[in-house]
Amino acid sequence: MRVLGIETSCDETGIAIYDSEQGLMSHVLYSQIPLHADYGGVVPELASRDHIRKTLPLIQQALKEANCGAQSIDGVAYTAGPGLAGALLVGAAIGRSLALAWDKPALAVHHMEGHLLAPMLEETPPEFPFLALLVSGGHTQIVRVDGIGQYQLLGESIDDAAGEAFDKTAKLMGLAYPGGPLLAKLATQGDAKKYAFPRPMTDRPGLDFSFSGLKTAAANVIAAEGTSEQVQANIAASFQQAVVDTLVIKCKRALVETRLKRLVVAGGVSANTSLREQLAALMASMKGQVFYPRKDFCTDNGAMIAYAGWQRLKAGQAQDLTIGVTPRWPMDQLPPL
Ligand code: KG4
Ligand code: ZN
């Protein structure tokens, strides 16, 4: 079975083709970052308008790069949530309509399930069950995964997501949007022990997170210490270490509680080198294994949507002709395979 995947939930248009026999045949990505940079964040209306412009040409490009025709596509998968409603509607409308025109089934994919399954595209995919740490711009979640659609949410952020905290702190430091990767780069030049930022909610039981206070702590240091290059690097390194420590502490706690030995880390922040290194050290100390997507597939992409859609389409799941999106969509509402 060959599936076309369409991702338009935020500021990247991602298209990919996944095939049962050949695996990932092509993937193309168009980033809207330059479009939103002047505004310091994603402008939803501009995002929708740009997805409308880019989606069909990118589908054509993905088909060309996979060296296959539209008639060889057996199903279409599109992100239907969570995300920006207008942006999601573009992918949903185009994806559902192409499937109708091609007389093939269509499937509405959950964006976070896409992230969660992205490591399955790598050479050594994780086996079920595993613990997943999902860290993106909109979500920070710890999930017990027993199979596709068998998700138990163990903890999540009660306010800002980890990526959002990176982006907001970077913005306070005057870095360009999206600041997460820029802050991480700056952190490599700084002293992570220079400022004692809190490790929120680690001193009490439970697996929930809170990152908004960390951003406020960073704002106070920025106001007090100024923005010389070395000060900025030290703030970046200390802030990053506080986020990473917090994530590592909660993962360790969840692994002990669930007795799981496999950890999957996915979503934009899983591209962070420091987080990867420290979670690798944690799993080595616990005699377990950690799995990541390749760096290109940590952030939003079409490949993870094609893969997640393929899993569900080949199991016979499909959408009716109503074009619908679900901007808020708890992952544990997904049906099991
Ligand atoms: O998964 P993603 O592409 O979009 C959402 O589903 O939200 O995640 C984007 C987030 C942004 O907040 C971005 O700053 C963050 O991931 N991010 C990083 C890094 N690369 C991307 N944060 C820290 N370090 C990185 N290297
Ligand atoms: Zn995402």
Image (cartoon, helix red, strand yellow):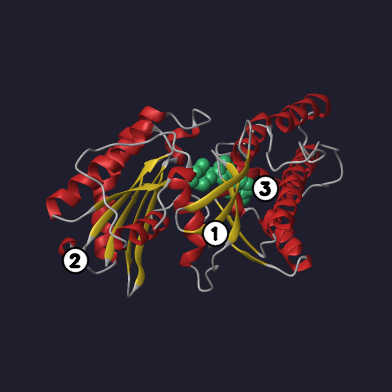
Disc 3, ligand 1: is the CB inside 8 Å? Answer: yes
**Which type of secondary structure does the marked residue at label 3 adopt?**
helix
Residue at image mark 3:
184
Judge whether residue 188 can be spotted in this image: no
**Circle 1 residue:** 295
Figure quadrant of the C terminus = bottom left
Say the numbered circle drawn on residue 67: none
Q: Residues within 10 Å of mark 3 (few under 14, many from 20)?
A: many
What residue is pinned by disc 2? 72
Q: Amino acid at mark 1?
A: Lys
Q: Residue at x 79, y 66 (%)?
A: 285
Q: Label 2, label 3: how many angstroms apart (C-alpha)?
A: 42 Å
Q: Is residue 9 above or below residue 101?
A: above
| Marks 2 and 3, the one that precedes in the sequence | 2
223 vs 121, left or right, is right
Task: Say which of marks 2 and 3 sits in front.
Answer: 2
User: What is the quadrant of residue 315 in the picture?
Assistant: bottom left
| Quadrant of ligand 1 in image | top right
Closer to viewer: mark 3 or mark 1: 1
- At a point 42% along the width and 54% down the height, the residue shown is 336
